[in-house]
Image (cartoon, grey):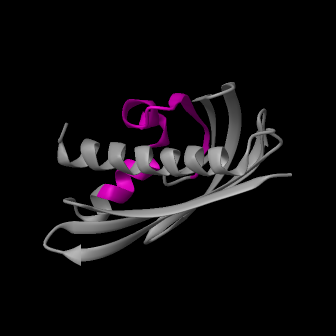
């Protein structure tokens, strides 16, 4: 079973608590992540943080539908896939590092497991593109840049 991984970071002109609030608003992801077409929180904890959410994402081979389970910490959030259509597993994490003066470094670490018969260099390009698009979308959403 192929496994692909990418890790990138970006510095954003927003305080860590603002960044974390945006990341935890998983229902808004279709507004700032181009590949996410649908996102619905299916369970929240008593504080209103997402516990599970269902997604539909555009891929090169069609629409993938999957459900993620979340864990939250003071400096980020992580998730694992509960069920999926094209993916057989997914683990991800956003880690936030305060940089001072209202700036935050966000590190996005993503691993995807699947059964797609694609060459490794294409899979690598796809997952790196997903991570880059997500971080670019997050920065644009928070900084209001085009």
Q: Position of residue 124 (x, y in %)?
A: 61, 51
Is residue 36 a member of the stretch shown in magenta?
yes
Q: Is 24 displayed left or right of 3 in the figure?
A: left
Numbered circles on residues, count: 0
Q: Nearer the viewer, residue 28 or 48?
A: 28
Q: Position of residue 94 (x, y in %)?
A: 48, 62
Q: Nearer the viewer, residue 70 or 93?
A: 93
Where, quadrant-wise, is the C terminus in this rendering? Answer: top left
Q: Residue at x 64, y 44 (%)?
A: 122
Is residue 144 a member of the stretch shown in magenta?
no
Quadrant hosting residue 78? bottom right
Q: What is the residue that sits farthest to the right in this orientation? A: 1
Q: Is 102 displayed left or right of 141 in the figure?
A: left
Quadrant hosting residue 30? top left
Q: Position of residue 84 (x, y in %)?
A: 77, 38
Q: Is 144 displayed left or right of 128 in the figure?
A: left
Q: Residue at x 34, y 47 (%)?
A: 136
Does 93 appear above or below 81?
below
Quadrant hosting residue 87? top right
Q: Is residue 70 visible?
A: yes
Q: Is residue 93 visible?
A: no
Q: Position of residue 83 (x, y in %)?
A: 79, 41
> In this picture, which residue range is highlighted in magenta?
19-45
Q: Residue at x 61, y 33 (%)?
A: 55
Q: Residue at x 62, y 28 (%)?
A: 60
């Amino acid at each position: 079973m192929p496994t692909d991984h990418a890790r990138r970071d970006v510095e954003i002109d927003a305080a860590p608590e603002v960044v974390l609030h945006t990341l935890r608003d998983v229902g808004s992801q279709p507004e700032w992540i181009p590949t996410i077409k649908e996102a619905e929180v299916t369970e929240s904890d008593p504080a209103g943080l997402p516990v599970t959410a269902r997604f539909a994402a555009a891929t090169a081979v069609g629409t993938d539908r999957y459900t993620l389970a979340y864990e939250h910490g003071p400096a980020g959030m992580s998730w694992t896939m509960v069920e999926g259509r094209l993916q057989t597993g997914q683990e991800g994490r956003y880690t936030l590092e305060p940089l001072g003066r209202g700036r935050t470094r966000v590190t996005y670490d993503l691993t995807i497991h699947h059964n797609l018969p694609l060459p490794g260099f294409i899979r690598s390009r796809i997952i790196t593109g997903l991570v880059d698009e997500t971080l670019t979308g997050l920065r644009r959403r928070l900084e209001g840049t085009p």
